[in-house]
């Protein structure tokens, strides 16, 4: 519907309504512009700034010109009023759009513009591991696509899946919140789990919110609208819209169906498959992978978060066709019921055995050797241990082994999101082709997060600007 010129004028006039707190600063801007133009005009008439074409006009008005010093002061005061008025106008608008954070408006606009120029990264996985990675990546680019598994059948997600027939929302909710650009209180609200109520106990508010939106408009549109509510930096997509179930064949020949049931068996898994095996991938997932600069597998549960996505027909083929840098982020700890006793190379062997032989360019492993004793003891009681980095076995796969101290010094043995994201971005910058060096310079070299993280990690992160003179010439010629 085309807007008439009268409606446009009425819309513009609303900025002059009383109480907005904008008119005064708008008038200051106009006054600054008037003083600036007056000073510039009088400097012209004094001959300080003069061209032959306007000499006749300015000579006629030169009698009205003040002393050049006053003309210069007019020019300077006009510039100062212009900047001051524009700044105050921005603050007045920011007080409405960003309560209590008025000074963040310019910063947010600036960062958004540069983040839009970042590389296209597809992160594949699920659970808490994927959300940890996304929290780090969103500081460098908004061109992120999180591809999330939909095989979860436990907890709140499993109950909603059984009762409403919808796809499990839990992992998708975690990824949406990880990419969100909203207030901490809003994130706490959507993560809140109800207690004490027979019907609601165990459900998170975010899952129920997604369930309500799914009932209203369908799962795919519900994710899109939820993304708008949270103002996320990127896109979150389910790997498929079909109701798929995991089936595992164990080393002793027995089988189990369902993610929770498989983990509870506590048996070595020989093979993983999907029911139905011919499920269709979400088309937008394949498009995102084909256009990606980098594809990241994990971190997360090997059998229940990473592999289910790669078993969807067409996903591995799309990664292979994309030519993108493909890195697998190995877990820091083994997982009871899935990867007990697994080394780093054993994780890799499982991926290769399930069709990923020629798509993985490198494996990222955390070589932290100073685990807090209380943290290590906590995991040992649960049957978990630190993943061993068996370097000789890893070398035989002819892929790059990327080691760095990536442990987050918190209550859980997880990756440090900033360190992990910075390491991945470095590996992307190191590539010879397909890079935008303007982005590399602006987003990494000048990014405070990168500089701070590089200082923490030391020699594990080579400088992104240590590229050859040929690359520097190509960069500065842009």
Image: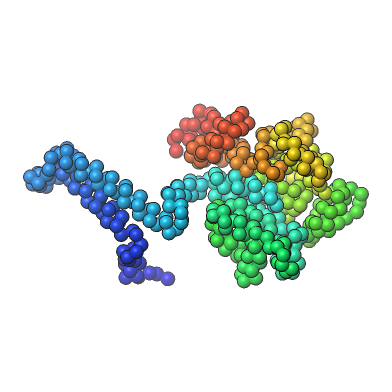
Left or right, residue 375 beside residue 268: left
- At 71% from the left edge and 58% from the top edge, which residue is drawn? 150
Q: Residue furthest right?
A: 252
Query: Which of these two is toward me, 33 or 155?
Result: 155
Q: Quadrant of residue 245?
A: bottom right
Q: Is residue 452 visible?
A: yes
Where is residue 188 shown, x and y percent of the image?
61, 56
Observer-nearest residue: 257 or 456? Answer: 456
In percent of the image, x 34 and y 64: which residue is there? 19
Spot occupied by residue 406 in the image (x, y as percentages of width and height): 66, 37
Q: Nearer the viewer, residue 175 or 328?
A: 175
Q: Quadrant of residue 342?
A: top right
Question: Which quarter shows the N terminus?
Answer: bottom left
Q: Position of residue 135 (x, y in %)?
A: 60, 47
Please give the name of the residue rendered at 65% of the width and 70% of the height, measured from the top-left corner. Answer: 215
Point out the residue furthest to the front here. Answer: 196
């Amino acid at each position: 519907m085309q807007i008439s010129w009268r409606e446009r004028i009425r819309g513009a006039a609303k900025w002059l309504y009383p109480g907005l707190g904008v008119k005064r600063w708008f008038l200051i801007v106009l006054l600054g512009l008037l003083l600036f133009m007056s000073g510039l005009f009088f400097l012209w008439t004094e001959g300080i700034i003069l061209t032959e074409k306007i000499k006749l006009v300015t000579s006629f008005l030169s009698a009205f010109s003040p002393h050049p010093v006053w003309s210069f002061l007019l020019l300077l005061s006009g510039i100062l009023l212009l900047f001051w008025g524009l700044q105050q106008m921005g603050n007045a608008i920011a007080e409405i759009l960003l309560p209590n954070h008025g000074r963040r408006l310019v910063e947010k606009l600036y960062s958004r513009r540069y983040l839009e120029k970042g590389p296209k990264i597809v992160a594949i996985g699920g659970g808490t591991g994927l959300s940890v990675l996304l929290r780090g990546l969103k500081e460098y680019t908004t061109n992120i696509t999180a591809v999330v598994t939909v095989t979860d059948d436990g907890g709140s997600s499993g109950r909603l899946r059984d009762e409403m027939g919808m796809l499990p929302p839990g992992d998708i909710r975690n990824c949406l919140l990880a990419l969100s650009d909203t207030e901490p209180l809003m994130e706490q609200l959507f993560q809140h789990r109800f207690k004490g109520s027979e019907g609601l106990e165990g459900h998170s508010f975010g899952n129920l919110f997604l369930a309500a939106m799914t009932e209203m408009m369908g799962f795919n549109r519900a994710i899109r609208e939820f993304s708008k509510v949270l103002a996320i930096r990127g896109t979150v997509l389910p790997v498929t819209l079909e109701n798929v179930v995991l089936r595992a064949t164990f080393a002793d020949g027995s089988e189990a169906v369902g993610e929770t049931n498989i983990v509870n068996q506590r048996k070595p898994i020989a093979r993983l498959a999907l029911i139905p095996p011919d499920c269709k991938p979400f088309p937008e997932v394949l498009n995102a992978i084909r256009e990606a600069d980098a594809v990241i597998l994990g971190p997360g549960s090997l059998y229940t978060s990473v592999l289910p996505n790669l078993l969807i027909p067409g996903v591995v083929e799309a990664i292979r066709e994309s030519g993108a840098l493909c890195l697998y982020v190995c877990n820091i700890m083994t997982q009871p019921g899935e990867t007990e006793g697994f080394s780093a190379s054993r994780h890799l062997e499982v991926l290769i055995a399930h069709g990923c032989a020629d798509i993985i360019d490198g494996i990222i492993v955390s070589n932290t050797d100073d685990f807090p004793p209380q943290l290590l003891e906590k995991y040992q009681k649960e049957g978990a241990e630190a993943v061993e980095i068996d370097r000789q076995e890893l070398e035989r796969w002819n892929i790059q082994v990327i080691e760095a101290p990536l442990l987050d010094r918190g209550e859980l043995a997880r990756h440090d999101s900033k360190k992990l994201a910075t390491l991945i971005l470095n590996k992307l910058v190191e590539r010879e082709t397909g890079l935008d060096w303007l982005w590399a310079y602006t987003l990494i070299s000048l990014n405070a997060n990168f500089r701070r993280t590089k200082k923490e990690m030391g020699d594990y992160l080579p400088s992104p600007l240590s590229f050859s003179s040929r690359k520097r010439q190509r960069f500065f010629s842009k």
